[in-house]
Image (cartoon, grey):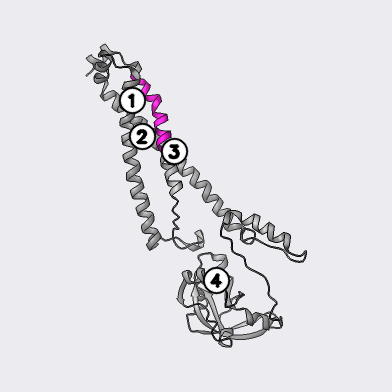
Amino acid sequence: NEIDGVVLKGVDKNYDWTFFKKSLVAGKVIDFSDTLAVQRQIMISQQTADRLKLKVGDKLIMYFVQEMRKRPFIITGIYSSGVSEVDQTYVIGAMSLIQRLNNWKPNQIGGYELRVTDFEQLNEIAHGVDEILPNTLKAYTVKQNYPTIFEWLGLLDTNTVVMLSLMLIVAVINMISALLIMILERTSMIGMFKAMGATNWSIQNIFLNSAFYLIGFGLVLGNLLGYGVGLLQDKTHLFKLDPESYYMNFVPIQFSWVDGILLNLGTLAICLLVLVIPSTLVSKISPVRAIRFK
């Protein structure tokens, strides 16, 4: 007594099940060992299963718009990709069934799905495929099929830049405040050093070295905490997300040692360069007044 509209995506025995095996919530992927039984097996999403109150092993009937034909199926697996647009649309079945329903020949299909190893070259690869296809066919990228998702991801990239900028500003302000406090607390010491012939730059180096130690110690603790929590999340998926809002059900983690090293070096360099300015306060301190200062 429940009806839902879906698209039946046909696959064959050569299909790469890596993604769906990771996304399986219950059951298993389609088994192509029996060519007759495989035409009755389907995989549905968790979203579809919840809406239609279905589970692995249940039987259901699918009605196809071509002449309103119906076929019985058995649910072999339930998956959750985390992308609502995909989960509410696609059901996975055998390509041979689709060929039979559409009266296609064994060598006829509805389209090819290509996967790239370098996502940054997606548009270039799609353009290259378009050039070798006849005029009656066209290649579409996943960005063109799901523009909303990638616009949202682009917004996240903007948020990342804003957050890193704000964190860097806070770090710089805190370090400047700490350095100024250190200089004020050591005013009499600065006066004594100057009275004994120390140059302004040599005294500045003392405070900059102390600042370097504090920044380095903070970076070490921050890296241990950040990478520790990241590794925990990567292995356990402890922190969950609402798939309806974020297109995924957990916070994904991707480690890049190059980005980590550059971020640490950049933070250290920027903080030290900014601290050179407040450290010039040392040159304004008079030795006589500083020695009397308590």
Which residues are drawn in magenta?
266-282
| Quadrant location of the C terminus in the rendered image | top left
Say whether residue 275 is magenta: yes
Please, what is the three-letter code of the amino acid marked with disc 2?
Asn
Disc 3 and disc 1 in contact, CB within 8 angstroms: no
Label 2 vs 1, first from the N-terminus = 2
Instruction: Report, in whole angstroms, how far the alpha carbon at label 2 lies from the one at label 3.
Output: 17 Å
Tell me the crowding category of disc 4: few under 14, some 14 to 19, or many 20 or more residues within 10 angstroms, Cα based: few
Instruction: Report, in whole angstroms, how far the alpha carbon at label 4 lies from the one at label 3.
Output: 41 Å
Instruction: Report, in whole angstroms, how far the alpha carbon at label 2 lies from the one at label 1.
Output: 19 Å
Disc 4 and disc 3 in contact, CB within 8 angstroms: no
Residue 46: percent from left, percent from top: 49, 72
Which residue is nearer to you in this view: 18 or 283? 18
Kindly identify which residue carries mark 4: 16
Element marked by disc 3: helix
Kindly identify which residue carries mark 2: 174
Tell me the crowding category of disc 1: few under 14, some 14 to 19, or many 20 or more residues within 10 angstroms, Cα based: few
Instruction: Report, in whole angstroms, how far the alpha carbon at label 4 lies from the one at label 1.
Output: 60 Å
Q: Nearer the viewer, mark 2 or mark 1?
A: 1
